[in-house]
Image: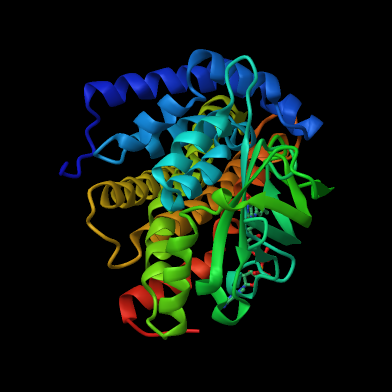
Amino acid sequence: MADFSNALNEDQLQLQKWVHDFAEGVVRPAAHEWDEREETPWPIIEEAAKVGLYSVDFVGNMFADPTGISVPMVMEEMAWGDAGIGLAIFGTTLGVAAIFANGTPEQIGEWIPQCFGTPEKVAVAAFCVSEADAGSDVSSMRTRAVYDEATDEWVLDGTKTWITNGGIADVHVVVASVDPALKARGQASFIVPRGTRGLSQGQKFKKMGIRASHTAEVVLDDVRVPGRLLLGGKEKLDARLARAREGKAGERSQAALATFERTRPSVGAQAVGIARAAYEYALEYAKERKQFGRAIIENQAIAFKLARMRMHVDAARLLVWNASWRGASGQGFAAAEGSQSKLFAGETAVWVTDEAIQILGGAGYVREHPVERWHRDAKVFTIFEGTSEIQHLIIARAISGLRIA
Ligand SMILES: Cc1cc2nc3c(=O)[nH]c(=O)nc-3n(C[C@H](O)[C@H](O)[C@H](O)COP(=O)(O)OP(=O)(O)OC[C@H]3O[C@@H](n4cnc5c(N)ncnc54)[C@H](O)[C@@H]3O)c2cc1C
């Protein structure tokens, strides 16, 4: 087991520089254009695939780092370049993580490579959980999966919403209810490959921020997938449902909670990347901009803002790295450290980008400078992957041992 350390090793330093160079040279220069276009930046994803940044091997190695630091480090650098393009590139990892966490070794081997495609023909994946009436409360999901024994097929019906890469993915991982009476414990995940009849994109959303990342509804109308596309297999599902029906609570929901705790730091890391970008930009601007015959940073009102912004960015990163290390080294999450890191980093990004606009004054409010975009991008980090309120709930429950509502 690796100890927690803030000091990056040689490999991590190299990785950081490599991803930073890509973020600085390729991602950031493209950010404004793709924000305006509100389209998936396929050429940038292709470029990432070409240099090896978007591939099974790269993502596999990143997750295999025993210190847990590589994942948040890469996510921070990419979001520092641009959070929307960063999500267009790494949104695929949501689906990949679901296959990895729930799939059999055969399913992992067959489907994870298809989530990425090849540098010549890149693909993306989507993870479809949320519905119009099941956002924070995933247990009230209506999408149904019914087994057709005669054909050994699962029949999926329902509409998912807010899905990153929804409708444009080669691989949709869809969570559906197999036994609604069992609520969250009656759910299972299915792979729906591109071209499956009955799967279509519904409304594509026009968003406030991260506009280079595609978000849409996914409609499942009598979608039939072969039995082998149930993640984990039927035997395992039947055993789990039987345990749940006997009232033997919780193994799966405990496992699912632990999975979310492990993935949340990587979301927090993206928020750290946006916050750091805004802090750095505001610092430089404050040194250059002169009013009343001196640089605005020479006023404590501005310099103290920057001091606090820096402190919050560094604190957020420490929470993120600590939580990521806890996940990688099997320390567990006694105080929901994964949620802590996502909550703190998300709120830090919103606050720091707001302060950055203030420091730039009118220049902060217009699109000639990137800080207004960073503020728009930051906001989603208090909403998706569990809202700030839900993160508070998870932390409160973890530290109290009570079912706080
Ligand atoms: C850009 C974007 C991309 C997304 N990508 C995906 C994706 O790829 N896959 C996917 O499945 N989903 C995705 N989502 C959905 C996202 O996870 C949900 O939006 C989120 O979980 C919140 O659900 P909701 O929007 O229905 O809000 P609601 O659950 O309706 O919440 C509304 C408000 O009520 C509060 N609230 C709800 N319950 C409680 C409670 N018990 N206590 C206190 N406050 C509460 C919430 O915190 C929030 O402030 C995405 C969303 C966005 C915006």
Q: Is residue 373 above or below residue 132?
A: above
Image coords of residue 351 (percent x, y)? 55, 52
Residue 281 visible in image: no
Left/right of residue 311 with respect to residue 148 in the rendered view? left
Snapshot quadrant of residue 357: top right
Q: What residue lies at 37% left-to-right and 24% top-to-bottom? A: 16
Q: Nearer the viewer, residue 310 or 9?
A: 9
Q: What residue lies at 42% left-to-right and 70% top-to-bottom? A: 239
Quadrant showing the N terminus:
top left
Residue 165 visible in image: yes
Q: Residue extending furthest front? A: 150
Q: Nearer the viewer, residue 237 or 218?
A: 237
Q: Quadrant of ligand 1?
A: bottom right
Q: Nearer the viewer, residue 290 or 121?
A: 121
Image coords of residue 91 (percent x, y)? 58, 40
Q: Residue extending furthest right? A: 203
Image coords of residue 324 (percent x, y)? 33, 47
Q: What residue lies at 32% left-to-right and 52% top-to-bottom? A: 323
Q: Is residue 71 above or below residue 258?
A: above
Left/right of residue 52 with respect to residue 160 in the rendered view? left
Q: What residue lies at 48% left-to-right and 22% top-to-bottom? A: 53
Image coords of residue 360 (percent x, y)? 64, 37
